[in-house]
Amino acid sequence: MKLLSPLLALFLLTSFSQAIDPPEKLWERTHTNIEALFDIELVSSGGFICAGYDEVGNCIFRFNDDADLLWAAGSTYVWRAEDVDELPDGTFIATGANYATFDDAGDLWNSVLFIQKYDQSGNVIWTKTYSGENALDEGFNIMLLPDGGFAVCGKVNGVVGSAIGNAWILRTDANGDTLWTDIQGTHTVNFARGIEYDPVNDWIVVCIYGRTEELINRGPHLLYYSLDGE
């Protein structure tokens, strides 16, 4: 028993030290021309698609399996994409914030939520923007729906220099035209960060952080919508 205890202690110490050792990094790539990346998705034909931004208006970035940049896409005045998805036909859809107006000093005064669709080579097929009035608005997540339209969540009525805003949920058709929208939460910190379609119940689920009339203290909560916005 006296011999067993030191052996057991040595085994536990060795196991613990191995458990906290960091994993070996397989490889790493850097791209100094890209300012930031916020989302990454596998592409069916191989490689990755990422959402983010650079200094020249690109907001999605296509990489091969070795993380070589194949192409970057966006359009004039695009600020940043927060989420990008590949669609069944191999095209891509992204949402984020699009520059709208600037103050006299050239600083961002307000922005609008955008959806942008791209072909397989990164050419812009169409761009749609959605905005509150004189606000800082942004899209955070986009989801393809069974009818080919999209469900989007984000923030509306934001204030520059603060986290104030309302959670914003939008439903569009396949061309990005608005079918319905909903604004949730008090005018404090509210963000609709995640959105998913539940095929079992045929509804849209939205993940929100913020305040509501019932939720006095800020916190996470879920909202459920029918495809008709109920």
Image (cartoon, rainbow, N blue to C red):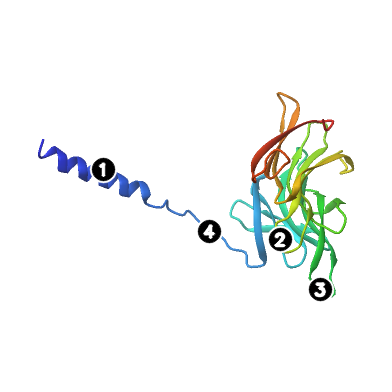
Q: Do the residues labelled 1 and 4 touch (CB within 8 Å)?
A: no
Q: Do the residues labelled 3 and 2 touch (CB within 8 Å)?
A: no
Q: Is residue 111 above or below residue 125?
A: below
Q: Which of marks 1 and 4 is nearer the N terminus?
A: 1
Gap in Å between the C-alphas at discs 4 and 2? 34 Å
Q: Nearer the viewer, residue 218 or 169?
A: 218
Instruction: Give the residue number, with chain letter if any, for mark 4.
Output: 28
Mark 1 crowdedness (10 Å alpha carbons): few <14, some 14-19, many ≥20: few
Earlier residue among tags 4 and 2: 4
Marks 1 and 3, the one that precedes in the sequence:
1
Please tell me whether mark 4 sits on a helix, a strand or a loop.
loop
Kind of residue sitting beneath label 1: Leu
Residue 82 locus on image (x, y percent):
71, 52
- Mark 1 or mark 2, which has the lower sequence index? 1
Q: What residue does disc 3 label?
A: 106
Q: Position of residue 196 (x, y in %)?
A: 70, 36
Helix or strand or loop: what does disc 2 sit on? loop
| Tag nearer the camera, 4 or 2 | 2
The residue that label 1 is drawn on is: 12
Where disc 3 sits, the SS reads loop
Q: Do the residues labelled 1 and 3 touch (CB within 8 Å)?
A: no
